[in-house]
Image: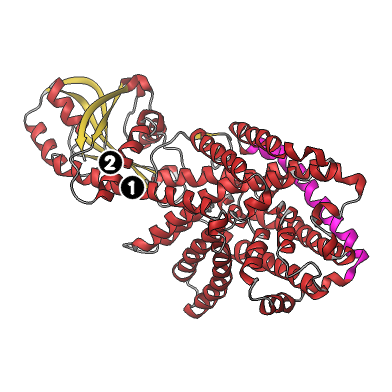
Amino acid sequence: MMGALGVVYGDIGTSPIYAFREAMHIRPDASSTHNEILGLLSLIIWALTLTVTIKYVFFVTRADNNGEGGTLSLMALARKTFTNPPAWITVMGVMGAAMFFGDAIITPAMSVLSAVEGVKLVAPDLARWVVPITLVIIVGIFFVQRFGTAKVSIVFGPITGLWFLVLGFSGLVHIIQYPAVLWAINPFLGLEFVATHMSLAFVVVGAIFLAVTGAEALYVDLGHFGRKPIVIVWFALVFPCLLLNYFGQGAFVLQMGPENVESPFFEMQPDWAIGPFVALATAATIIASQAVISGTYSLAQQAIALNMLPRMMVLHTSATQSGQIYMPQINSMLMVGVLLLVLMFGSSSALSHAYGIAVSGVMIMTLALLVVVMWRNWKWHPVAVIAFGMIFAIIDGGFFIANAAKLLQGGWVPAVVAFVVAMTMWAWMAGRQRLSDKTRRDEVPLQFLVDNLSKKKPTLVPGTAVFLTSDIEGAPTALLHSLKHYKVLHEQNVILTVRTSPSPRVPDDEKVTIDAYNELFSRVVVTFGYMESPNIPKALMLARKLGWKFDIMSTSFFLSRRSLKLGPKVGSPFRYWQDRLFTRLARNASDATEYFHIPTGRVVEIGTQVVL
């Protein structure tokens, strides 16, 4: 629970710094009435209750795929219910994952900037140092990622716990001084505000949405800690303290007068506490970035295993929690993106316009896939599914439209990032399919080759040869080239295919299957879950239980290394551009030897050239 507190709730826990402030900045006029302030506060309270508590904590976290969460996990869960999954489910999974990447570069920039800006209240002369300090902190955040989620959460958990207690206490003090603010719990005050200020409705709803950002990271990080700790911490500490702080900000504004308050979160603290509060807020925003960063690692690993992205290095940072990983390439790309955003926008108010489109888009994709799971997995009655879907479609759709209105003010940034990621995934999946089709046309049927070699055996040499191939029917290219050039065959030859299960993890007794063609050839299929690190030598050790005497020191692994070349420009320019992107991605993908954890001294790579 302490780990979940430190990693999962850091993002949503720092929303009070800027959410109510941004809503106040776009109120109708400087002399807002009592009911208008209560209406804004009511919208925030009910956005938290409906979107985070009911939708995510009660329902979305139940839609785990053997303990794993996130858009791609939900997509895999929805696809398992169909014999032939419709393409739109995959499209929604890709779009949701791409939008989360867009969100991942916004959250650290927004969170850290908003906290560091508090130094202007302590010493106005430090205003020019806000951006440099933010840049240094962000570099530090990404530097410590290599130590792993477990070690990071040990430090972050207690600090986040203190942060929420301080949030709750500082809000409670002002609620006691002005208890009338509790009338904001009436949802009709929020609806009245929207109805009477239709010209500002979308802008206000876009600001209110800042209060619920972080809910999507809550689901993606499900695999790191499990559902139970996440739910317990939300109801026992996070939700009550958030409510107290928002009510406290509202009470402070109503006491002082809206026209006299610029940043209620910091200004409602006593003068002696502003310095320590800014320091604690900065620490909390550093932690807030952790939820989306670790969530991005999980999402990227799932995308790689589902063949939606090229292979990248995945480092496991915990001996007990397999979901805790570190991906150096993703870490570097995120850091560069976050630093650029801080330099481009320079303030949290300016950056708030860019915040929301990606997050609200992820929430819509999550809702659509959740409805499929409710209908086909949970066997809900169609009427209940439709009612649930329509209620939250109105809420999530309203948030998305409100944030889309800020597209030209900065919302284009996460939209562009999401578009680039989605196009990358599409190009990779389409390129893999075309490469597979082309390779299959050029390959010799495996059964045909096995039958011929059993009749007319070439020279046999001692040992075992393992030939990796993704095509279960065709003869591996490495085998054909080995026979062509070496004109010998090993005493034991294994055709090895690695598959990815739609489940996060596969039990050891179901991981390996062996079929013998004859005394020379065997077929081995190894199945890994999409959240598992594909370690081929360890998997083959399991084959001993099935009667195969596997010895790594007498085994050679033969891999085909394809050199992709672009053919002449035929067809649409888009197709040519897609092939160019796929070729670059394939060249920069992690080496198969490293990805599958095969000892480099036991690998023989045979190159082939393929023209796309």
Q: Which corner quadrant of the image does residue 549 belong to?
A: top left
Label located before the other in sequence (2 or 1)? 1
- Write the residue at 41% across / 51% down: 422
Q: Which corner quadrant of the image does residue 284 belong to?
A: top right
Identified by mark 1, the residue type is Ala
Asked whether residue 159 is drawn in magenta, I would say yes
Asked whether residue 114 is drawn in magenta, I would say no
Q: Main secondary structure of the magenta part?
A: helix
Element type at marker 2? loop
Is 62 displayed left or right of 247 in the figure?
left
Vertically, is 244 above or below 505?
Answer: below
Determine the residue located farthest toward the left in the rendered image.
456
Vertically, is 484 above or below 472?
Answer: above
- Write the residue at 81% across / 57% down: 264
- According to the image, label 2 marks what residue? 470
Q: Gap in Å between the C-alphas at discs 2 and 1?
A: 19 Å
Is 304 displayed left or right of 230 in the figure?
left
Q: Which mark is residue 427?
A: 1
Residue range in magenta is 150-179
Q: Position of residue 174 (x, y in %)?
A: 89, 61
Most foreground residue, 225 or 212: 212
Q: Position of residue 116 (x, y in %)?
A: 74, 42
Element type at marker 1? helix
